[in-house]
Amino acid sequence: MTTQPIQQTFLDELGLGDLPQEKQEAILVKMTEVILKRIFLETVEKLSDTDKEDYAQMIESQSEPDQIENFLKEKIPNYEEMVKEIVENFKKEMKEEN
């Protein structure tokens, strides 16, 4: 697996760009997991009970990612901004820890 340019930028911003490729990839996997969990928790918190059921059914039926994203954009006002904010907050936390 080769690091994508956006991922490399992310690592560089956190001062991790000089680590060996293998370490970078391991860190990216862990950071991605944390970010996805945060997005999931925030998403579920903002959905109504009915929407949560619909969302769960979409995940269980392995709906296309685009279909799920469109559903969330429709149900959660400013969904994209919410995701960006979660990523930015995560980066800020990581920079403070370094």
Image (spheres, rainbow, N blue to C red):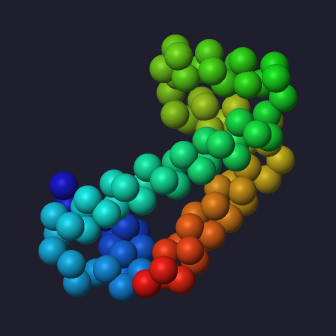
Pick the front one: 26 or 71? 26
In the image, 34: left or right of 71? Answer: left
Q: Please tell me which residue is depicted at 15% across the width and 74% down the height of the picture.
A: 20
Q: Residue at x 65, y 56 (%)?
A: 83
Q: Position of residue 78 (x, y in %)?
A: 79, 53
Q: Can residue 15 be seen here? A: yes
Quadrant in the picture for the C terminus? bottom left
Determine the image quadrant of residue 85.
Answer: bottom right
| Image coordinates for residue 30, horizontal then vertical, percent | 37, 55
Point out residue 64 in the picture as x, y percentages from the top left corner. 50, 27
Q: Residue at x 60, y 30 (%)?
A: 67
Looking at the figure, which quarter contains the N terminus?
Answer: bottom left
Residue 19, percent across and down?
21, 78
For the question of whether residue 74 can be seen, the reply is no
Image height of 94 relative to 78, above or below: below
Q: Residue furthest front?
A: 97
Residue visible at 65% across and 43% down? 41
Q: Is residue 57 left or right of residue 19?
A: right
Position of 16 compared to 1: left or right?
A: right
**How many labels sit on residues?**
0
Q: Which residue is at the front of the view, 23 or 4?
A: 23
Position of 70 relative to 22 (above/below): above
Quadrant assignment, res 92? bottom right
Above or below, comparing residue 85 to residue 39 in the picture: below
